[in-house]
């Protein structure tokens, strides 16, 4: 029996088309063309048959045998896939280690040693399959991966991701200075191997945005890259029309080290910018210790920020100010930053982002209270803009905003927001089916949660908004029962 051409999901559909907007279609319908992998239509409160809906959406009659209906239960909803804008595939090998160390010591003790092992292609073949399966199981449909300096292992990583059906950017890490002798390369080797990797993964179609797995230019970070290496990578990004990823202002010691390597540049950001690595397809991870020059250059160039709160807490790097980025119009998404972060879950990243945001608000509030108590302050000396500048009075990130960062925000950071990130007609169908009532679910039953139960009949949209909030703060991989990428089912429970 041939596979139906069209899928129609019926039930609750939730997404966040704009920051702070939680769009709930409590009794909706969504159609997918499985051949193109795209959404053909979305409707609210539809009673028509699935075949009639598909016929309406595509503008021609469709036989019911070509349509498969997926009926979502009262405890299930459909949502966009989660997007991990920053993670290191080889660092799954030492997940959970070294979180009592600062960044630079952690790199020396664990990261470089473990990544160097991937010169063994057999290790890459066996290990990456398990690591990628774990990422997919956590509902990540699109990820930006760092590999290692080894071309063969990186090609195995790309093949493993492609075979798993996940969407991804994969980068060959480049590091030609200030690196251990057992894990380094010359400038010429770094650039040649990067170009070899690009051709191996994509052939002559490196800029094809429809490809499932694509290369991404990946200088590890400024301290381990010479000016010649950075400039050469900038030229490769332009030559092949590729995105760029790296690290920026993660840790005070790292920032000082980077600036000492390039003392003539105005800021850390300026180092990447002068090398031709900044643009609207650039992803900079962390951005914790950003001065005004960094912020302005990132904003002007359209660079996206990958907020990695788990890692920033775990390595005592600091707390990135997401509200500051948003107010400056800088795209923000979430990253797990495995293994600086110990959880390969964007659900965890949402919660950690909420914690970092609240901790910043509380820290600044308390600092202002102490300052006020220690001296008499003339009210006329306080500028109206002070609160906006340090965000002391900023509202905590809410569930709708966190979901946006995990989906549409991440798509924007990856330069793919016109193709995915929300459940709109014409977009690629990268999506999850969430079941809040699986056995041993960490999410309370709707019937026992008064705030939810009282809305179930009178206002199902309001009930689902509350349940979506519970999903953000309580759910785990047990609740992610189906994972779709490009219209294809790649994982199910």
Image (tube, rainbow, N blue to C red):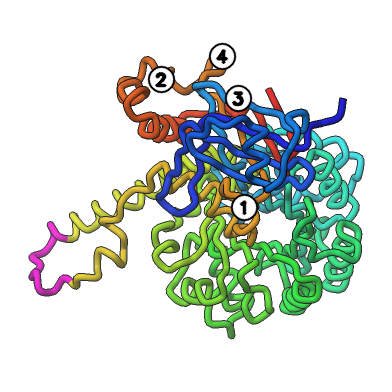
Q: Which residue is mark 1?
A: 85
Residue density around tag 2, few if under 14, some if 14–19, many if 20 or more, within 10 Å: many
Q: Residue at x 46, y 46 (%)?
A: 402
Which quarter of the picture shows residue 232? bottom right
Q: Which residue is mark 3?
A: 71
Q: CA distance from mark 1 to mark 4?
A: 31 Å
Dot 2 or dot 1, earlier in sequence: 1
Dot 3 or dot 1, earlier in sequence: 3
Q: Residue at x 61, y 32 (%)?
A: 9
Residue that protrudes farthest toward the front in the picture? 61
Is residue 107 among what the camera can see? Answer: yes
Q: Which residue is mark 4?
A: 439
Q: Secondary structure at mark 3?
A: strand
Residue 292 is situated, as x and y percent measured from the top left of the image, at 43, 74
Q: Which residue is mark 2?
A: 446
Residue 349 is situated, as x and y percent measured from the top left of the image, at 52, 43
């Amino acid at each position: 029996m041939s596979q139906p051409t069209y899928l129609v999901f019926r039930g609750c559909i939730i997404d966040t088309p704009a920051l702070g907007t939680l769009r709930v279609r409590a009794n909706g319908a969504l159609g997918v063309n499985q051949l193109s992998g795209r959404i053909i239509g979305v409707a609210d409160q539809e009673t028509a048959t699935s075949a009639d809906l598909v016929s309406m959406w595509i503008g021609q009659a469709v036989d019911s045998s070509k349509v498969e209906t997926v009926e979502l239960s009262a405890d299930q909803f459909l949502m966009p896939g989660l997007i991990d804008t920053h993670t290191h595939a080889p660092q799954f090998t030492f997940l959970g280690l070294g979180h009592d160390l600062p960044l630079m010591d952690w790199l020396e003790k664990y990261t470089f040693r473990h990544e160097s092992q991937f010169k063994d292609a057999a290790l890459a073949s066996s290990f990456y399959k398990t690591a990628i399966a774990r990422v997919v199981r956590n509902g990540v449909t699109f990820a930006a991966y760092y590999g290692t300096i080894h071309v063969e292992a990186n090609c195995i990583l790309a093949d493993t991701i492609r075979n798993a059906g996940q969407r991804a950017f994969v980068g060959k890490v480049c590091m030609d200075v200030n690196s251990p002798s057992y894990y380094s390369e010359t400038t010429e080797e770094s650039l040649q191997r990067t170009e070899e990797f690009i051709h191996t993964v994509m052939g002559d179609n490196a800029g094809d945005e429809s490809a499932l797995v694509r290369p991404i230019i990946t200088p590890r970070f400024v301290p381990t890259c010479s000016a010649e290496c950075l400039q050469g990578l900038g030229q490769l990004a332009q030559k092949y029309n590729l995105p760029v990823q790296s690290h920026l202002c993660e840790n005070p010691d790292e920032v000082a080290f980077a600036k000492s390597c390039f003392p003539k540049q105005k800021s850390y950001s300026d180092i990447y910018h002068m090398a031709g690595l900044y643009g609207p397809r650039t992803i900079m991870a962390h951005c914790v210790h950003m001065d005004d020059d960094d912020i302005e250059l990132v904003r002007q160039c359209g660079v996206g920020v990958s907020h990695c709160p788990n890692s920033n807490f775990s390595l005592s790097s600091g707390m990135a100010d997401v509200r500051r980025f948003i107010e400056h119009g800088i795209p923000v998404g979430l990253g797990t930053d495995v293994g600086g972060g110990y959880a390969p879950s964007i659900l965890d990243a949402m919660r950690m982002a909420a914690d970092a945001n609240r901790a910043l608000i509380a820290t600044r509030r308390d600092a202002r209270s102490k300052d006020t108590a220690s001296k008499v302050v003339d009210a006329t000396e306080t500028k109206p803009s002070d609160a906006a500048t340090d965000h002391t009075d900023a509202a905590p990130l809410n569930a709708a905003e966190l979901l946006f960062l995990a989906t549409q925000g991440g798509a924007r950071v990856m330069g793919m927001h016109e193709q995915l990130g929300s459940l709109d007609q014409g977009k690629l169908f990268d999506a999850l089916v969430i079941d809040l009532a699986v056995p041993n679910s960490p999410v309370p039953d709707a019937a026992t949660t008064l705030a939810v139960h009282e809305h179930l009949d009178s206002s199902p949209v309001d009930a689902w908004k509350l349940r979506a909030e519970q999903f953000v703060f309580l759910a785990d991989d047990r609740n992610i029962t189906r994972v779709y990428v490009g219209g294809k089912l790649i994982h199910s429970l």
